[in-house]
Amino acid sequence: MTRPTVLVAAGIVAFLALVTFLGRAPQQPSGPASSSYATTPDGLAAYASLLERAGHDVRRVRASLDDRPPARGEVVVVVDGLPLAAEQRDALHAFVAAGGHAVLAGTAATTLGGRPAAGRDVVQRIGRGTATLVARADPLRNRALDRDDNAARALALAGAPARRVAFVESVHGYHDARGLAALPDRVQTCLWLLGAAALAFLIWRGRRLGPPEGQARVLPPPRRAHVEALAAALARTRDRDTLKTTPPKTETEPT
């Protein structure tokens, strides 16, 4: 096996080992506070998992509510995060007024103009629908969901298990991903590593820049041509005496 082949094989083995390590590496808690994606103590990933186990169809809304209005019959959950823009507030208000239901917790409790009460949930009537206002989002977070009756309270906010629950994630900085950005982070990392490995291989195998090389090696002229050229030069000269060669002097060793 040649040395280049060994190097290529070693590179492939190292790359596969790195990909395997990334796939098995434990995931650290991450995500913004009050997001259903977040696994940190302040996240709501446990709440979303609890709803799924209870029979709810849970989805995350990353698009703007005015671009993709909530579906009929689902419960829209907005917890903390950035304030909704006027267009999104209007879309949420129209959804609730048409008979929908929303759960607004934390800083998002005043999104539709209602006033939450400390210590208890407030149900706000809007048109044919309702919005449940929760003053503090702490009972819904990962670190407190298993305390007291917080889990039962969280399930009650979502209603019957047959209802779909939509967490609005645009308020936490999430947006619709397209193209390569829609792939999972691990897949994107693998693609970047594959690209880097391909680039390194091209650089290694490519020819270095420099002057063009000849098709054959330049050899010295044959001895016969050299002798003939010297003879022609001797034939053209008229001073024959200068052509006489004197034998080299040799040193004699002292006796």
Image (tube, rainbow, N blue to C red):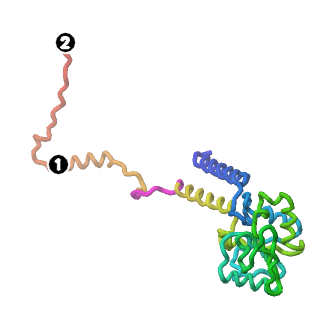
Tally of marks: 2
The reply to whether the magenta stretch includes residue 38 is no
Furthest residue toward top: 255
Q: Which image quadrant is residue 70 in?
A: bottom right
Q: Secondary structure at mark 1?
A: helix
Q: Foreground: 115 or 101?
A: 115
Q: Mark 2 vs mark 1: which is more N-terminal? A: 1
State the CA–CA distance, disc 2 to disc 1. Answer: 45 Å
Disc 1: CA contacts within 10 A as few (<14), some (14-19) or many (>=20)? few
Q: Is residue 24 visible?
A: yes
Report the front residue among 26 and 252: 26
Majority secondary structure of the magenta segment? loop
Image quadrant for the C terminus?
Answer: top left
Q: Quadrant where the N terminus lies?
A: top right
Label 1 belongs to which residue? 235
Q: Which residues are magenta?
A: 204-212
The residue lying furthest to the front in this view is 118
- Residue hosting label 2: 255
* Near-viewer residue (90 or 123): 123
User: Residue sitting at 51 percent across and 57 percent down?
Assistant: 206
Q: Disc 2 or disc 1, which is closer to the eye?
A: 2
Q: Considering the numbered disc 2 on the image, is that residue within a helix, a strand or a loop?
A: loop
